[in-house]
Image (cartoon, rainbow, N blue to C red):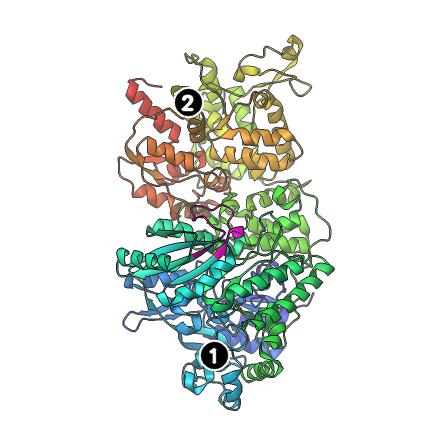
């Protein structure tokens, strides 16, 4: 490994921003959203233009390359490098000025697009271009790539919105670029004026020509616009430090026409004809990209055509004009903003969804965004599909049909020599096909390494040599992002998969979606960075720790990058024992939000459990793993010894509580929850059986939290389930000394043990079912397996009876639904139990469909449990709340306590920050009449400890309403 200590020391002495040459800092930026990987020497987060100039001076003296990086969502490899990477998102991320009179904004390169949009929106303004990554892409990255987005048919590319740019050249000159040769480096004007004929004839007229340098912008008839010519240069000409951008007037109202066609070629051929009607967008996608139609009109492909107007009626009228003008098989016009957002989410998530084929196999970028004249798009797509077939490849095209720009991920084999050879041959042939149709190799995301090698096929050798001469004028030392655009690296070099192990690694979980291969699971993260959003929207959860810290290593993508480098082994060198990976995973709340919110289904909670399992194998574990990780064991012991009152008293005694928390690895800021003096099953054994009992049998799962900490939730659930006519039982609690019980439905739960032999009953031992959640979250997977196998032994009579298993605690239900079958993937009983699990609301909806809940008729506030959102779904809960007259929406995000996470030492501040994002503000804004719903014990505890209020499980709310109706009390 090269020694960069001298470079690091010199940079630390020269800049005020952070300098990171440690393993974690470098590992986080080895990749962008492309197929490529380069290991940098280090990362600098400059505070201002002076820092940028200082970095360039140091690196020029040492001949070290410099790469500018924004959100790291580039798809062609241009945001990776082997020298020093400049991270503008940490400090140079401000909106410096917003002038509503001139409709301009002054921005720094690290400003995320959505932050600009939020600031402009109250003035009726917006930035025109809006890539699908708008929640995390930066203005600097957009300028570097000349990004476009779905509204480019109305508002053009980023270059169309740029007025002035402040840049620092590789040799330290500070230039202010604009029209009429403003800011041009010495020699650029002379070079361009000597090539006027080539500039006028060598650049195809396309709405989405992004490939190469935009040298035709230097023509006198185009205003000799140096700023515009700089756009799309991918950080190879200078380092952007500030930009003046033009804003546009946002329409007061919008409507969305969704037009259905038989196939994508029909949709593509129709798109160009709609442009004269002045739509804001003309987006296209085919049925093979949509896993579930989700309310789309019937068809094999769709155009999403947005219209604007001064009023909702005017916008709708324009959308209906679009429908009448289009030859469609079916159509839909949507004016409700929420419904529009839901439909647009399908399109925006396509950049991640497309990375998996319908059968789950992998697909990759590389030919992500080529563009042809819109009128030729239908013919091009037919030829493109034929070329795919000739190479036995599959892809799912979608994109900006109105601009002739197509996005596609293709199932290249980038792991074997033969597959990489096919990747090269296909790329060369597709480049020729694009050129035949008069197109551009890149229509949005830039050339990078993926396509720059093929630019001579589009422009010819002489124009490419002109590009090289222009690069030499701006950057004579070839310091800035070398290997991009000119003198490019081969398109099949530096592939990020080549460093992964040749054989699968031994793992505990089954990874069924990745054929049991942990390497494939880690490869899932393609870098689209939806986890880097700085505000949670709607019900979304991912990624609360990133939003709390703002640090890449605490994003889902950052953790996936570190796991990738752990497997690669050349940067993170100590494998499962890596402290870098451990520290990045330490603030993962295991909320499972990424499992549902990540477009490619990364499941960092599972990866964390897997890592901790290996990391601590044969090693001393943290105290929190032994206390909270084994919580069910300790709580059963406390219940058996009847010492809950004593422990409650000790926990309320200051010095003893502080000592106990320090000993147990518990945050000093946390209160210790009170233990129930009577467990739920203790109450169950002493209750009078309900009369009637002729309804459907349901088995109520006595999870650890309901059993020992919130038995009132269990009692309430029994009250409601029986009121709905269901027959409630608990799981069996007797297990023979030798293992499985041979038959029957026995134990105190499902009533009887009539088929058990007397000998079996005499030798049986009492046991409890457990989902293993606390063992799973702390990576104690061997112990979790033992507990889950015992649980399956106990549950065999229930499984044979086919009874639904009602689980009240969402995190426990999620563990049984997902972790159980993935950890015990070889045991068919695991899948059977997982499929039997239902939530409280699902049990009522499915098995007591004619029951009417009591009328509560009050507003609600609170939070949908993150595991409910990510794994279980809350549709049945919404319907149950509506039927009971509980109005309003629950907030999204994560409460921040997340089981043991928020109790662990060192996690309190992050835990509180997560709660402050959505949950606590929603509760503070609630009226006195509002019902505070929180189905998870962690959520209720967080509310009690941080807000001083009591949240209730939905079962408790309904049980109270039943008692009020009948005048009784449970």
Picture quarter containing residue 833?
top right
Q: Which mark is residue 229?
A: 1
Answer yes or no: is residue 803 visible.
yes
Picture quarter containing residue 305?
bottom left
Q: How many marks?
A: 2
Asked which secondary structure carries label 1, the reply is helix
x 62%, y 23%: residue: 793
Q: Residues within 10 Å of mark 1 (few under 14, many from 20)?
A: some
Q: Is residue 39 left or right of residue 71?
A: right
Residue 224 to residue 661: above or below: below
Residue 245, percent from left and from top: 38, 72
Residue 126 to residue 695: above or below: below
Residue 821, percent from left and from top: 60, 35
Q: CA distance from mark 2 to mark 1?
A: 69 Å
Residue 783, percent from left and from top: 63, 33
Q: Residues within 10 Å of mark 2 (few under 14, many from 20)?
A: many
Residue 910, percent from left and from top: 46, 48
Q: Which residue is mark 2?
A: 721
The segment highlighted magenta reads 285-303
851 or 68, nearer to the observer: 851
Q: Is residue 340 left or right of residue 12?
A: left
Picture quarter containing residue 19?
bottom right
């Amino acid at each position: 490994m090269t020694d960069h200590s001298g470079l690091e020391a010199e940079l630390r002495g020269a800049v005020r921003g952070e300098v990171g040459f440690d393993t974690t800092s470098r590992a986080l930026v080895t990749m962008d959203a492309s197929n490529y990987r380069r290991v940098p020497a280090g990362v600098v987060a400059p505070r201002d233009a002076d820092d940028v100039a200082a970095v360039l001076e140091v690196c020029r003296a040492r001949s070290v390359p410099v790469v500018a990086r924004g959100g790291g969502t580039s798809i062609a490899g241009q945001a990776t490098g082997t020298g020093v990477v400049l991270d503008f998102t940490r400090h140079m991320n401000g909106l410096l000025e917003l002038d509503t009179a001139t409709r301009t904004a002054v921005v720094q390169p690290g400003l995320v697009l959505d932050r600009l949009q939020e600031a402009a929106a109250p003035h009726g303004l917006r930035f025109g271009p809006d890539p699908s990554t708008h929640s995390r892409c930066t203005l600097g990255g957009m300028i570097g790539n000349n990004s476009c987005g779905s509204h480019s048919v109305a508002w053009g590319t980023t270059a169309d919105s740029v007025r002035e740019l402040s840049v620092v050249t590789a040799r330290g000159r500070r230039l202010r670029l604009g029209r009429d040769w403003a800011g041009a480096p010495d020699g650029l004007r002379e070079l361009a004026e000597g090539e006027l004929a080539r500039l006028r004839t060598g650049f195809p007229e396309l709405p989405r020509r992004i490939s190469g340098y935009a040298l035709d912008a230097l023509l006198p008839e185009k205003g000799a616009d140096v700023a515009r010519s700089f756009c799309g240069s991918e950080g190879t000409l200078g380092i952007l430090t500030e930009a003046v951008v033009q804003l546009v007037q946002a329409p007061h109202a919008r409507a969305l026409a969704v037009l259905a066609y038989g196939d994508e070629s029909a949709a593509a051929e129709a798109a160009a004809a709609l442009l004269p009607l002045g739509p804001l967008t003309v987006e296209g996608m085919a049925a093979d990209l949509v896993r579930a139609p989700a309310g789309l009109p019937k068809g094999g492909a769709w155009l999403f055509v947005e219209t604007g107007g001064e009023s909702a009626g005017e916008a709708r009228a324009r959308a209906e004009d679009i429908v009448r003008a289009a030859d469609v098989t079916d159509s839909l016009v949507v004016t409700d903003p929420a419904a529009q957002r839901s439909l647009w989410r399908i399109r925006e998530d396509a950049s991640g969804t497309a990375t998996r084929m319908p059968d789950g196999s992998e697909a990759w970028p590389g030919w992500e965004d080529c563009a042809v004249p819109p009128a030729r798009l239908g013919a091009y797509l037919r030829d493109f599909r034929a070329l795919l077939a000739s190479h036995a490849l599959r892809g799912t095209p979608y994109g900006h049909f109105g601009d002739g720009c197509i996005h596609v991920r293709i199932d290249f084999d980038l792991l074997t020599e033969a597959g990489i050879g096919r990747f090269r041959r296909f790329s060369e042939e597709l480049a020729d096909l694009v050129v035949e149709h008069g197109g551009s190799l890149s229509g949005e995301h830039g050339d990078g390494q993926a396509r720059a090698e093929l630019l001579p096929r589009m422009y010819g050798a002489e124009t490419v040599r002109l590009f090289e001469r222009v690069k030499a004028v701006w950057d004579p030392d070839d310091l800035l992002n070398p290997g991009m655009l000119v003198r490019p690296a081969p398109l099949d070099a530096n592939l990020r998969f080549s460093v992964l192990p040749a054989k699968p690694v031994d793992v505990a979980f089954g990874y069924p979606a990745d054929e049991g291969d942990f390497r494939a699971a880690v490869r899932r993260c393609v870098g689209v960075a939806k986890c880097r959003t700085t505000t949670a929207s709607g019900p979304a959860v991912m990624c609360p720790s990133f939003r709390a810290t703002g640090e890449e290593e605490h994003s889902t993508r950052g953790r996936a990058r570190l796991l990738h480098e752990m497997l690669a082994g050349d940067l993170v060198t100590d494998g499962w024992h890596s402290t870098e990976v451990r520290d990045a995973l330490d603030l993962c709340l295991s909320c499972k939000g990424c499992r549902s919110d990540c477009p490619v289904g990364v499941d960092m909670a599972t990866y964390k459990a897997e890592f901790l399992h290996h990391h601590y194998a044969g090693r001393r574990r943290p105290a929190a793993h032994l206390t909270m990780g084994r919580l069910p064991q300790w709580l059963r012991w406390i219940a058996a010894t009847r010492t809950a009152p004593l422990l409650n008293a000790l926990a309320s005694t200051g010095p003893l509580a502080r000592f106990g928390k320090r000993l147990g690895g518990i945050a000093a800021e946390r209160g210790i929850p009170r233990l129930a003096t009577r467990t739920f099953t203790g109450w169950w054994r002493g209750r009078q059986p309900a009369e009637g009992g002729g309804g459907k049998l349901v088995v109520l799962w006595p999870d650890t939290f309901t059993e020992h900490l919130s038995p009132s939730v269990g009692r309430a659930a029994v009250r409601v389930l029986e009121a709905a006519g269901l027959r409630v039982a608990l799981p069996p609690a007797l297990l023979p000394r030798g293992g499985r019980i041979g038959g029957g439905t026995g134990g105190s739960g499902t009533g009887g043990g009539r088929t058990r032999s007397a000998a079996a009953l005499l030798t049986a031992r009492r046991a409890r079912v457990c989902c293993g959640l606390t063992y799973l979250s702390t990576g104690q997977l061997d112990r979790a397996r033992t507990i889950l196998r015992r649980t399956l032994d106990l549950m065999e009579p229930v499984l044979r009876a086919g009874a639904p298993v009602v689980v009240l605690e969402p995190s426990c239900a999620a563990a049984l639904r997902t972790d159980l079958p993935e950890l015990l993937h070889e045991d068919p009983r695991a899948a059977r139990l997982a499929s039997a699990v239902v939530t409280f609301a699902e049990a009522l909806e499915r098995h007591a469909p004619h029951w009417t809940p009591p009328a509560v008729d009050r507003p609600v506030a609170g939070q949908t449990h993150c595991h409910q959102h990510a794994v279980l779904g809350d549709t049945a809960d919404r319907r149950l709340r509506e039927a009971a007259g509980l109005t309003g929406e629950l907030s999204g995000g994560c409460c921040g306590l997340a089981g043991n996470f928020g109790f662990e030492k060192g996690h309190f501040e992050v835990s509180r920050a997560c709660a402050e994002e959505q949950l606590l503000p929603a509760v503070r804004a609630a009226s006195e009449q509002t019902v505070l719903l929180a189905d998870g014990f962690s959520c209720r505890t967080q509310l009690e400890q941080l807000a001083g209020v009591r949240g209730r499980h939905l079962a408790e709310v309904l049980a109270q309403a039943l008692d009020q109706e009948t005048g009784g009390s449970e």
